[in-house]
Amino acid sequence: MNNSPPRSIDLRAVLLLAGAMFCPGVSRAQSYEEPPINYARAPADDPITRLQALLDAGQRTLDFDPDRGYLPALLRALEIPASSQVLVFSKTSFQQKQISPRTPRALYFSDDVYIGWVQGGDVMEIAAADPQQGATFYTLRQKLAESPKFTRHTHDCLQCHESSLTRGYPGHLVRSVYPDEGGFPVLAGGSFVTDHTSPLRERWGGWYVTGTHGSQRHMGNAIVADRDRPEELDVQQGANLTDLSKLFPTTPYLTPHSDLVALLVLEHQTQIHNQLTACNFSARLALRDNAVICGMMDRPPDELTESTQRRLSQAAERLLEWMLLCDETPLQGPLAGTTGFAREFAGRGPRDARGRSLRDLDLGRRLFRYPCSYLIYSEAFDGLPAQVKEVFYRRLWEVVTGRDETPRFAHLSDADRQAILEILGDTRSGLPDYWSADS
């Protein structure tokens, strides 16, 4: 006698599983702590863990500076330029007691690491972009040690770095607030998470900004005069500053600047990292669920169901829109910083046969000359599951070849599309074969 359940039972189980996948009660916070992601338990593989391995093996050392601790040595080890320095004086860090308009926190960044340093701080704060785990967080004690140790943090840091502002996954964010004279955000005025879609008038509240931007105004370099009316922030006083020495002592910092162009790039980069994490996690969870469904239905585990294909397409499409800078706020340039950051950033390439790079900056009407994010070369992008990367490449190809002319990508001119197609054809390894036929 055959005691196996009828096929209808399997299908009901599949439907129950599908319902659980999309149930509002199943939060993303729960999902990224489960297989296959296991955020808090899985080992990280990012620039910080690799540097720690070199330190432990005695193949690398970090010199200790009596004034700035491990900061200069860490920047050298991670190849982070001092010109990337930006200064934030709002109390939006866990080391807020040391942060004020007179003693701002300094941030430095490369394509995949962010370093936070405060005067007199017990630790340096570090965030990295892990190809599989997304944003990973560390501290390094600012005390001379025979063998410096980075400490990874998960739940403590996620109190601020996991919310709807980071798409519900561990992520990075740049906030703009209305700061009072002590650096405390005046919450009655609200706050803004800033990226390349943000109007300039909402950016940099609680930050110092050095650079020129013409008649445009931002919230930087200014302090709320009346806590009952924070929105009346005097933005004129902070406009087009190139010297911060009258606002606070700049000598403790590696440079006296908080470069406007570095801020623009930082805001773009943090959101793209968040979108890469969301795409990665969403795809891996979809593929996990797909394997369960295929197992129930006696199908090959790599056969994608229609629902899985939809989930992969949605994840890829959202990433595509961010990578192509949809909804970017137009600039009314020219904008300029006060350091060599713009030149150093663009100089890192890669460049195509005609000398063009996705790192080339515009700073007149928009951030980049060729509006496709340079993080398409990043380890975080390379770490995307092959199935979602395949969908992403197909959609990118459809857009840049003009096959997709929907209004969503109307900001891309024919020249933009052709340039992106050709630059990537020359510089991005691993493109599908069909790409070379058009590039």
Image: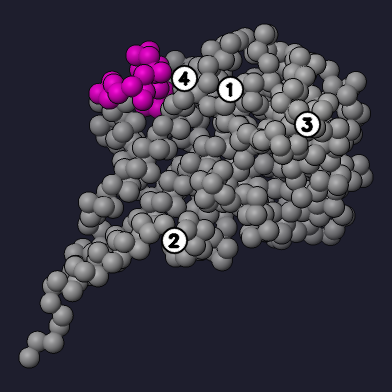
Report the residue marked by disc 4.
370
Mark sitting earlier along the chain (2/4)? 2
Left or right? Give the position of 167 relative to 149: left
Q: Residues within 10 Å of mark 4 (few under 14, many from 20)?
A: many
What amino acid is at disc 2?
Answer: Gly
Tell me how far mark 3 sits from mark 4, CA to CA.
43 Å
Query: Disc 1 designates what residue?
Result: 199
The first of marks 3 and 2 along the sequence is 2
Quadrant in the picture for residue 100? top right
Disc 3 residue type (three-letter): Asp
Disc 1 is placed on an element classified as: loop
In the picture shown, does residue 33 fall above or below 380? below
Q: Earlier in the sequence, mark 3 or mark 1?
A: 1
Cα distance between the residues tagged 3 and 2: 39 Å
Closer to viewer: mark 3 or mark 1: 3
Would you say 347 lies left or right of 180 here?
A: left
Cα distance between the residues tagged 2 and 4: 41 Å
Confirm or deny contact between disc 3 and disc 2 (CB under 8 A).
no
Residue bounds of the magenta highlight: 401-425
Q: Mark 2 and mark 1: span between their CA atoms?
A: 34 Å
Q: Is residue 368 above or below residue 1?
A: above
Residue 412 in magenta stretch: yes
Q: Main secondary structure of the magenta part?
A: helix
Please report the residue visible at 64 percent of the width from the left and 42 percent of the height from the top.
113
The residue located at (63%, 34%) in the rendering is 192
Q: Give x and y (percent) for residue 90.
A: 78, 37
| The image quarter in which residue 105 lies | top right
Under tag 3, what secondary structure?
Answer: loop
